[in-house]
């Protein structure tokens, strides 16, 4: 095994890491870069708590080697705020109470954001499909669907990330 | 915990094949959506991991009305799902992809990786086999092409030899008056199938069955054709009793296991139901 | 998508039941919230636990010498050398039920039980070290099902428990035999209820840091920091005051995080030995196999009714699969028997419950606390009885339902009850649905639940809930509570009660919770107790602070004694002349000056008194669930639902909706998805691929009709919300199947195969009939 120098661009900043190639992207983000907003909830690519964006699309960062993420623009939950203002999807989550314990919220928000990036006006079913890779044990999901719908309806006018 | 490995990152397909030939105990990673799970469970611990995810030469979707569809091995599920040309010519592939795992997995996971992993519950294989797809694999010395149904050998085992990787999947151009359908039985929308059935039907000018392919998923170690039912249907006209009979044959001509999610008996039963339904659905679509 | 209706709303408040964003929301939606899972301390080591591979075995020898030789391995602890057989249990009053050695000395009793813990400089090294620890076992015969474990010749799991019976519970009122005599119709059924995993998104985890001054600080994901502090003091032989538990953000609990777990005690024991912080995070698999689960039960119930549907008597007998240890299972055993009578009036009732030890994962409390099992059996049997007698199942239920003033002999008196209006709402909704497609049906189920338990098996000398309200000179308010926020929104609910009472805005109130060093003791978040109990304590504390502020205001105002002052929206004023007043901050500043510079401090506490045996108040609900079934495959899909719900006065509007919808999703999972199969004591699906948690695509609309009543014992009339709704759904799904096909499924979760089997049997019977 030979350690690798890897440059990861996370939330617009290049981080140079010297890591074991088996390091997962989620480990690089949490343990090396220190952004602990991204969570882990399983070992089987099931729960979606580790969801981040890679060039704007959602992936589960526990299922990608950090070395494979080199060259992409990675966005984590910490990267959604712009100039100290929350993203519309974050405001909508607050207004709808679309989280409870909050542990799934960062991943759920990133999945919702990825969906809106691709499809600004999703149907209810498209929203459900868009977040089916994320488990929330608390809310029963309907408040999350309402939050995405609220953003899609243009209720929050700030620039989308 | 993943065991340590040496990471190999080739710059081109040629280099990848050369590296793969050179290294014993080497595993190819592409999207890694299945591989990293089994590595994390310690089920496999290769000394080398060869990354082909970034190899652009294998990332393509090409369609020609005569030649049909060619999909490069590193093409992601999401690219297939979102391809207009596939949606137009092979809608069943898009439907299948939409229900393959979650968006996140489809965004990163690839068709080549999925087929090479050879999970008998995998979604693409039964559909592609029903569409009469071929697969091309290659090593540093050359390539070989075979019907996709011959590619699978056993649970998680394929014909791939040392140094060989999946290069391309080829699906023939859709015949006139043909259609295919796929459905899996599961508990959660995004789950793999407890069992699944795919059917493609081609009708002749008189509406009789010219060609039919029935493929079962998770009904044994590999995706499984139900040739006895196919023979039954050939030359026949639309008849729901016939579909039910074909379903009954499907439930007999398979070797599903019993596990915590379903007994063998239930799997056989549902395979029959799904096969009957998929035949009807494909037939009706083929009829237009 | 979802409809939320309020039936008889109360007078509007300033803060209560308005749209208030969760006060810890910003931290949670931005990733700033630091969970125990995220904690990293300087010099921190990582711990891993070696677990028993056997369901029942004697430990002969443990050899960890090779593990210690691995570079980076810092230390190992075992039961024999370090914890010396110390036992733990949450039923502290009953020493024989504190039956779980924190690390076993002599034998293991289930697969996954902690045996050895190791700490290393990285998690990876710690995990590797486990492979180098040799444990020699003598495998003993094991038993996995309660009906086998009570047999005379079954293996003995704990010494001194005859036939492996861990706990028995008996509830009885009225003359049962006589009441059955009065019945025109008697029906008896056996049911089986499965387990369920709590499946908190944050797995069990802890970071323990012991310092040479003899103090121990533990970050831990739990539902009751005070319980953890007291229990850890017990097992470590320390004083409670020398242990600090910090649980600021907790990634879910659901009843699974208020007992000690391996993460907390192993990390603490390692930290004490090594004098360095030690972090242990359970993998998802460990969280499945080595924590606890909802209690599986075998239920016999016999019910006698009159021809007109009047309920006469019921007797029930329950055998629960207790697993290897007691935990909170004894409480679940009592509550299932109690709620099996709910929400109906029985002239006579008898319940006998037996909790049986087996060599499986221990069972314990989980959201609903025995009641989902009770309702699964009761509400289905009642539906069948109505059908047997040709009566309308809603009207039959309505006729027998509790009402204000209902006395449950020796147990409780019902002070508030809105179930009659729940029946109205459900009936309207079902009628509005009209004719359903042929493969769809609606099933209903009623239930009730408690608002906190009155029992004190924990043997706490403290008030059940306490709160301190401190008003600063700038009008900001510090609210210190021992109540625990686990996502249910209790911090927000308590901030709302504080703000409403004190006459300030929610944003003026900063809530401090989840830290035993700075907050008063409180039993924590379980049994739906915090809104009522901690809410009352907060209300009392805020009233105390308000009284002190108003004393100064009165002294200065020179008002006639017949006039009263109040504070609303930061405005201190005469109630009769609201325009005549003064800014809250100005008054507070003078009041503080008047106290020689001391901040205004109000104290409040609550312990239930003279409220019966079980709970100070009861919520009521009736649920209707529309399902669609594929008759050929047996697959169930949930299509729609309405829950009519009486939780007294709602306090936290968003929190309430979230709790009701969330409980419904978990309850639906219990009804048809979340099976936990064991083979020879081994859980067969300890991962999220094979254990099925409901996802957004499976979740139907969760419409709510909130029936507002006034509960005299609750703060502003509030009672429980959010746990009780875990109870009705499984039975509602079962009843929908009965409606649709006339089949009776007696085992939950309901599986596709069971439906097909029942349909087949029914067809065969019909054939024979012809």
Image: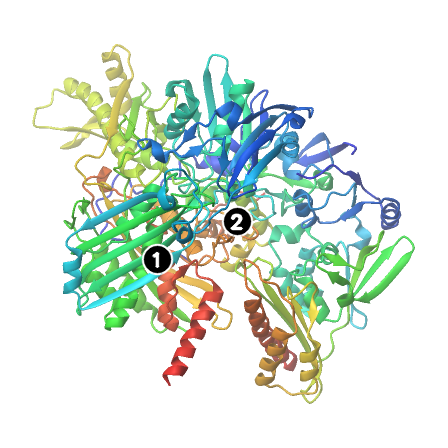
Q: For this view, does C47 lie left or right of residue C381? A: right
Name the image quarter holding the N terminus of chain B: top right
Please give the residue where the numbered disc 2 appears in the rendered image.
C683
Is C620 displayed left or right of C140 in the figure?
left
Q: Is residue C48 above or below residue C650?
A: above
Label 2 sits on a secondary structure element that is strand
Q: Residue at x 17, y 58 (%)?
A: C177
Q: Position of residue B128 (x, y in %)?
A: 71, 67
Q: Residue at x 49, y 32 (%)?
A: C104
Q: Quadrant of the C terminus of chain B?
A: bottom right
**Circle 2 chain:** C
B135 over C606 or under it: above or below: below
| Location of mark 1 (residue) | C376
Residue depicted at x 48% and y 37%: C28
Q: Position of residue C429 (x, y in %)?
A: 31, 64
B96 sits to left or right of C459: right
The reply to whether residue C252 is in sight is yes
Circle number at residue A141 = none
């Amino acid at each position: 095994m030979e350690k690798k120098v890897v440059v990861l661009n996370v939330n617009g900043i290049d981080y140079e890491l010297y890591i074991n190639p088996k390091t997962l992207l989620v480990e690089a983000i949490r343990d090396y870069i220190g952004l602990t907003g991204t969570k882990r909830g399983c070992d089987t690519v099931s729960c979606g708590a580790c969801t981040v964006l890679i060039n704007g699309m959602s992936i589960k960062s526990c299922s990608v080697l950090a070395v494979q993420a080199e060259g992409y623009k990675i966005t984590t939950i910490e990267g959604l705020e712009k100039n100290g203002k929350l993203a519309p999807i974050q405001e909508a989550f607050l207004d709808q109470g679309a989280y409870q314990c909050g542990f799934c919220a960062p991943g759920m928000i990133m999945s919702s954001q990825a969906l809106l990036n691709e499809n600004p006006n999703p149907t209810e079913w498209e929203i459900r499909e868009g977040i089916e890779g994320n488990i929330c044990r608390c809310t029963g999901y309907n408040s999350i669907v309402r939050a995405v719908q609220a953003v899609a309806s243009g209720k929050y006018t700030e620039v989308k990330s | 915990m993943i065991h340590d490995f040496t990471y190999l990152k080739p710059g081109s397909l040629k280099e990848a094949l050369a590296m793969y030939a050179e290294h014993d105990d080497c595993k190819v990673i592409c999207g890694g959506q299945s591989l990293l799970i089994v590595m994390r469970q310690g089920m496999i611990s290769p000394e080398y991991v060869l990354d082909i995810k970034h190899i652009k030469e294998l990332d393509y979707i090409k369609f020609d009305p005569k030649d049909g569809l060619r999909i490069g091995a590193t093409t992601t599920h999401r690219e297939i799902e979102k391809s207009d040309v596939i949606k137009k010519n092979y809608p069943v592939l898009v439907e299948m992809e939409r229900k393959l795992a979650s968006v996140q997995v489809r965004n990163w996971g690839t068709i080549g990786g999925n087929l090479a992993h050879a999970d008998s519950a995998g979604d693409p294989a039964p559909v592609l086999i029903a569409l009469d797809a071929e697969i091309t694999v290659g090593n540093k010395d050359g390539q070989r092409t075979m019907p996709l149904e011959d590619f699978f050998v056993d649970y998680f085992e394929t014909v791939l030899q040392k140094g060989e990787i999946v290069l391309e999947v080829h699906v023939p151009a859709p015949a006139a008056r043909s259609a295919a359908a796929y459905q899996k039985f599961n508990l959660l929308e995004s789950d793999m199938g407890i069992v699944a059935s795919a059917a493609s039907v081609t009708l002749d000018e008189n509406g009789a069955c010219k060609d039919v392919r029935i493929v079962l998923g998770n009904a044994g170690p590999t995706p499984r054709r139900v040739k006895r039912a196919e023979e039954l249907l050939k030359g026949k006209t639309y008849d729901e009793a016939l579909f039910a009979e074909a379903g009954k044959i499907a439930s007999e001509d398979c070797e599903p296991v019993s596990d915590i999610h379903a007994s063998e008996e239930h799997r056989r039963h549902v395979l029959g139901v799904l096969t009957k339904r998929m035949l009807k659905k494909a037939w009706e679509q083929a009829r237009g | 998508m979802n409809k939320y209706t309020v039936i008889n709303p109360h007078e509007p408040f300033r803060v209560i039941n308005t749209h208030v964003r969760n006060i810890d929301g910003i931290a949670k939606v931005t990733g700033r919230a630091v969970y125990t899972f995220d904690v990293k301390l300087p010099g921190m080591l990582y711990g891993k636990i070696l677990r028993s591979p056997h369901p029942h075995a004697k430990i002969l020898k443990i050899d960890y010498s090779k593990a210690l030789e691995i570079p980076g391995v810092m230390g190992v602890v075992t039961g024999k050398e370090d914890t010396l057989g110390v036992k733990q249990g949450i039923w502290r009053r009953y020493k024989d039920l504190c039956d779980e050695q924190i690390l076993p000395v002599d034998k293991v009793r289930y697969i996954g039980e902690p045996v050895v813990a190791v700490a290393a400089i990285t998690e990876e090294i710690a995990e590797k070290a486990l492979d180098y620890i040799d444990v020699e076992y003598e495998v003993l015969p094991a038993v996995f099902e309660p009906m086998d474990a009570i047999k005379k010749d079954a293996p003995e799991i704990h010494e001194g428990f005859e036939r492996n019976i861990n706990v028995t519970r008996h509830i009885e009122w009225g003359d049962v035999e006589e009441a059955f005599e009065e019945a025109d119709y008697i029906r008896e059924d056996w049911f089986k209820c499965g387990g369920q995993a709590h499946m908190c998104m944050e797995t069990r985890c802890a970071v323990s840091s012991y310092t040479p001054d003899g103090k121990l600080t533990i970050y831990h994901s739990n539902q009751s920091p005070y319980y953890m502090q007291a229990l850890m003091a017990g097992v470590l032989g320390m004083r409670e005051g020398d242990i600090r538990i910090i649980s600021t953000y907790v990634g879910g609990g659901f009843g699974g995080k208020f007992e000690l777990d391996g993460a907390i005690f192993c990390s603490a024991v390692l930290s004490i030995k090594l004098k360095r912080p030690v972090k242990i995070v359970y993998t998802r698999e460990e969280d499945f196999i080595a924590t606890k689960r909802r209690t599986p039960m075998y239920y016999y119930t016999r019910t006698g009714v009159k021809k007109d549907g009047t309920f006469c008597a019921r007797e029930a007998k329950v055998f629960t699969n207790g697993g290897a240890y007691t935990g909170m299972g004894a409480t679940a055993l009592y509550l299932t028997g109690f709620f099996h009578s709910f929400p109906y009036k029985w002239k006579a009732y008898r319940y006998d419950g037996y909790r049986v030890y087996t060599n499986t994962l221990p069972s314990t409390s989980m959201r609903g606390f025995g009641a989902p099992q009770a309702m699964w059996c009761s509400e289905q049997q009642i539906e069948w009885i109505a059908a047997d007698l040709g009566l309308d199942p809603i009207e039959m239920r309505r006729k027998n339902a509790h009402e204000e003033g209902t006395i449950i002999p020796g147990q409780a008196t019902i002070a508030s009850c809105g179930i009659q209006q729940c029946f109205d709402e459900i009936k309207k909704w079902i009628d509005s649905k009209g004719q359903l497609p042929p493969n769809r049906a609606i099933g209903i189920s009623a239930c009730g639940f408690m608002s906190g338990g009155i029992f004190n098996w924990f043997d706490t000398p403290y008030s059940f809930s306490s709160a301190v309200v401190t008003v600063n000179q700038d009008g900001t308010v510090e609210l210190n509570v021992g109540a625990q926020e686990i996502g249910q929104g209790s911090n927000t609910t308590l901030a709302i009660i504080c703000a409403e009472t004190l006459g300030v805005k929610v944003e003026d109130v900063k809530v401090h919770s989840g830290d035993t060093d700075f907050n008063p003791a409180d039993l924590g978040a379980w049994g739906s107790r915090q809104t009522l109990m901690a809410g009352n304590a907060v209300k009392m504390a805020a009233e105390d602070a308000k009284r002190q502020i108003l004393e100064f205001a009165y002294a200065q105002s020179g008002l006639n004694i017949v006039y009263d002052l109040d504070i609303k929206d930061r405005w201190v004023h005469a109630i009769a002349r609201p325009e005549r007043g003064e800014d809250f901050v100005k008054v507070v500043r003078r009041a503080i000056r008047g106290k020689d510079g001391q901040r205004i401090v109000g104290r409040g506490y609550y312990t239930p008194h003279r409220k019966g045996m079980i709970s100070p108040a009861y919520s009521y609900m009736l649920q209707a669930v529309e399902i669609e079934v594929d008759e050929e495959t047996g697959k169930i899909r949930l299509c729609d639902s309405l829950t009519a719900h009486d939780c007294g006065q709602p306090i936290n509007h968003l929190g309430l909706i979230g709790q009701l919808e969330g409980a419904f999703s978990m309850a639906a999972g219990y009804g048809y998805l979340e099976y936990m199969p064991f083979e020879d004591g081994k859980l067969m699906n300890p991962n999220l691929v094979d254990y099925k948690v409901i996802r957004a695509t499976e979740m139907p609309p969760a419409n709510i009709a909130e029936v507002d009543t006034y509960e005299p014992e609750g703060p502003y009339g509030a009672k429980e919300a959010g746990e009780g709704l875990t109870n009705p759904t499984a039975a509602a799904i079962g009843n929908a199947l009965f409606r649709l096909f006339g089949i009776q499924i007696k085992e939950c979760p309901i599986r596709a195969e069971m439906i097909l089997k029942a349909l087949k049997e029914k067809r065969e019977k019909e054939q024979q009939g012809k």
